[in-house]
Amino acid sequence: MSKSLKDIVPPHLQQKALDSIPDLSHCIVKKGKEYFDSAEGKRHLEDMLDDFFKERGKLINLIQLFIGNEKLIDKIQPEIIKFFEQSRKCSGEKR
């Protein structure tokens, strides 16, 4: 017979885990923004974009028509950073 985690973990520890969710989510958002704002994060994003568009050559050419000579990563990275900043606002972080 298997038991669920809820049956095994005492109620006070369950509540402690629930209470820690806002702090944990804040930490994840903060670390995500820091990573994607870093040179390593930018390189990783660029690699992911390259992999995505390898099989979609015509699509990347169409996108290049709209954004000109700028690299796609230079358009996408700031938007990802904005996403993380918006997530922080939604979680109630004060600036």
Image (cartoon, rainbow, N blue to C red):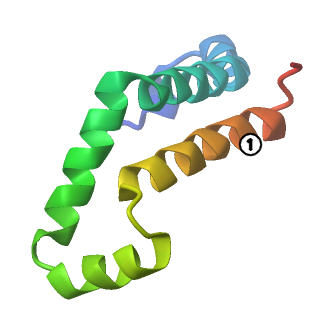
Q: Residue at x 40, y 81 (%)?
A: 65
Q: In x, y percent, where is residue 68? A: 43, 70
Name the residue that disc number 1 marks.
Answer: 86
Q: Is residue 1 visible?
A: no
Q: In x, y percent, where is residue 32? A: 49, 29
Q: Disc 1 marks which amino acid?
A: Gln
Residue furthest to the front: 69
Describe residue 44's horizontal placement relative to residue 14 as left or right: left
Please tell me whether residue 38 is drawn above or below residue 5 in the rendered image: above
- Give whichever of 6, 76 is nearer the camera: 76
Q: In x, y percent, where is residue 7? A: 49, 30
Q: Residue at x 18, y 80 (%)?
A: 56
Q: Secondary structure at mark 1?
A: helix
Sort mark 1 into few (<14), some (14-19) or many (20+) by Cα contacts within 10 Å.
Answer: few
| Quarter of the image where the N terminus is located | top left
Q: Residue at x 58, y 39 (%)?
A: 81
